Amino acid sequence: MLLLLHLLQGGALPLIVAVFAPIKYMVIFQYAFAILFLAISGALAAGAGGSKKIKSVLRICLWGTVAMCVSAAVGYILMSRLLKNLLFKTEANLKFSTIVLHLIGVILL
């Protein structure tokens, strides 16, 4: 049951955010909800493992944020200009591409 909740939280919930978030604020929504989902995951894991929830939530949120910042920086440095020029000419293409990338993430989980 806990694994099912974790898979739902890791793939389906960010996909729902991508579908319903306004394109203008997509990055902000994705990062904010990712932190929220990480906090929920940390609390569930701490509860299942019998450790302190606040310590677990803080740890997973801190290192999750660091990982997202590093990933965003690498993505920006290596790919942003190329992808922007090739794929994301319009807002509709950007939203579609975001949804497709999340669907691929859900399938790979």
Image: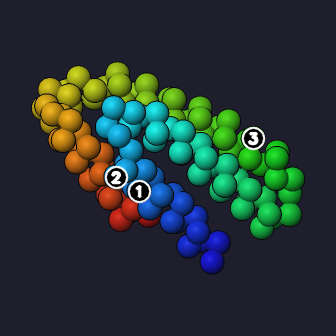
- Label 2, on which residue? 19
Q: Nearer the viewer, residue 10 or 30?
A: 30
- Report whether residue 11 is seen: no
Q: Residue at x 32, y 58 (%)?
A: 104
- Report whether residue 76 is seen: yes
Q: Quadrant of the C terminus?
A: bottom left
Q: Nearer the viewer, mark 1 or mark 3?
A: 1
- Residue count near mark 1 (Cα–Cα under 10 Å), binned few <14, some 14–19, many ≥20: few
3D distance between C-alphas at marks 2 and 1: 5 Å
**Lateral position of residue 94 relative to residue 26, left or right:** left
Colour scheme shown? rainbow
Disc 1 secondary structure class: helix
3D distance between C-alphas at marks 1 and 3: 25 Å
Q: Name the spot of residue 52 as percent of width and height, x first.
A: 87, 53
The amino acid type, in three-letter code, at marker 3 is: Leu
The amino acid type, in three-letter code, at marker 1 is: Ile
- Label 3, on which residue? 58
**Lateral position of residue 81 relative to residue 59, left or right:** left
- Label 1, on which residue? 16
Quarter residue 67 falls in? top right
Q: Name the spot of residue 24 as percent of width and height, x first.
A: 33, 32
